[in-house]
Image (cartoon, helix red, strand yellow):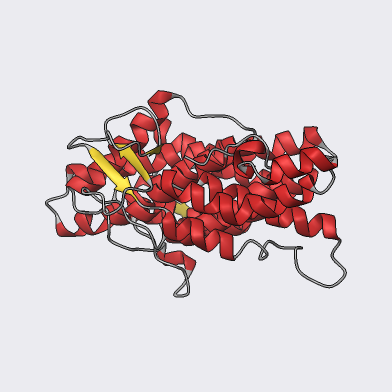
Amino acid sequence: MSTITRAGQLRHDRRPTQGRSAAPAKSMFGFLTPQTKDSSDPLQNAKSAAAWLRQLPALDVIGRQQNVIQALDAMRKTQRIIDLNRIAGIEFVDAALGADRRQLIKQYIENADNSPKLADRIWQALWEMSQAFMLSYQTALEAAAAQAENSRWRAALPLLFVRLVHFYGTDAKLRVFKYERWIPAKWLELHQTYLRACEMQCDRQSVALPAAGSAAQPWSAEQEYLYVLLVHQLNTGNLSPTEIDWASSQLRAWSRRLSLEQIPKSVEGFFVDMVGREGMVRRTGNDRGSMLRYLDTTPLADGMERRRDDRPGSSGGDQSAASRRSAQDTARHVAIAASGAATRSTLRCRSVSARAHRACAHLPGPLREGARGSNRGELFGYRTD
C-alpha cells in the first residue's frame, strides 16, 4: 500500500493494512487462475477420482462405499456435464471398488446366520452401491448415445452397456440372497437395455474396465445379460447365502459359453420375451414370436453335474460325509434349476437316483420294493417331464 508522508514523499508500504487479510483479494481475483480440480466434484476424470479415493479411509469399507454413493448421487443431482473424462472417472471408481464389493459379499455370507443385523447393514450397503452405479451408468449411456455419431463417443458405448447390465446382475444376486423376486418393471428395464445394445451393435463386443488392469476378463453385454437371467434361476428358496454365492460364480463362468439365438437349435432350454415382464421361461414347444430369444442350457446343466464336487470345502479327506452331500446337493439344485425341460429327465436319472436309493434303504421291506419299482424322481418331488 502507498502513502504520502508529511514531507510530501511517496512511501510504499508492503505490509497488509491492519484488519484486512490477503485472502479476500486472492479469492476476489481467483477466477483469473485456472482451476485444476474441484474437491466437491471428485469424478471429473480418472486422475481426480484416484486422488480422491486415496483420501478415503482405507480400512472402513462401508464408509468408502457411502462416500462414493454420495459423490455419484451429487453428480446426478447437480446435473454436471457428462463428458468422456467424467465417464472415465466413474469407470475408474467402479474398478477400484471391485475388491471392496467382494469383501462385503464375503462379510455378508459370514454374518448371515450369526449376526443378521450386521448382515442386513452390509446387504444394504451393497444394494445402495449397485443402485448408485446403475443410475450413473444410465445417465452416462444417455449422454453417449446422444452423440453416437462421434467415433470417440461411440467407442465408449460397449463398456457402458456392459457395466450397466453388470449392476443389474449385482442387484439380482442380492435379491436372491433374500429370496426376493424382481417386479415386472425391472425385467422390462433389463430387456430394453439389452435390446438397445443389440440395436447399436454393442451386444457382443467384449470389453473390460481400463483401470482393472490387463489381466481383467473382458465381458460383453450379452454375457452379462445371460448371467442376470441365470442367477434368477437360483431363487429356489432352499439355498443358503454360501451356496448361492458359489453357484452364482459357476453360472458366471458358464454364461460366457452360452449365447442367445433367434432360431432355437434344440427343443431343450429356455426362451426370453424381449418385450415381456419376466425372465427366462422353460420351453413348452408352443413358444413362437419375433421378439423371442432362445437359450440352450444343456452344456451348463451337464457341466454343473460334472463339477458338483468342486464346491469350496467339498474336497479333502477330513471333510465329513454330510458336508460332501451338501456340496453335491448344491450343484444338483443348480443343474436342475438351469436345465431345460428335456434335460431335467436326464438329470433326474443322474442326480436323484443316488439320494432316492439312500432313502429307499430305510423303508420297510414292502415299501422299499414298491419304491424301487416306481419313478424315483416323482417319488421325491422332482418332475421328469
Check the image and name the residue furthest to the left: 149
Q: Is residue 26 visible?
A: no
Q: Is residue 159 left or right of residue 376?
A: left
Please determine whether, in this image, residue 124 is positioned above or below residue 101.
above
Q: Residue at x 40, y 39 (%)?
A: 282
* Horizontal side, residue 81 vs residue 332: left or right: left
- Is residue 302 something that shows in the picture? yes
In the displayed structure, does residue 16 sit left or right of residue 90?
Answer: right
Q: Residue at x 30, y 46 (%)?
A: 294
Q: Nearer the viewer, residue 33 or 212?
A: 212
Vertical placement of residue 316 versus 148, above or below: below
Q: Position of residue 154 (x, y in %)?
A: 20, 55
How many discs mark residues in the rendered view? 0
Q: Residue at x 83, y 54 (%)?
A: 322
In this view of the protein, which residue sits in the foreground, 347 or 242?
347
Position in image of residue 3 (x %, y %): 47, 46
Q: Residue at x 51, y 63 (%)?
A: 303
In the rendering, at what x and y percent does residue 333 appear? 61, 47
**Residue 80, percent across and down?**
35, 38
The quarter of the picture where residue 140 lies is: top left
Query: Does residue 155 lie above or below 271 as drawn?
Result: below
User: Along the horizontal axis of the image, is 384 left or right of 321?
Assistant: left
Nearer to us in this view, 287 or 216: 287
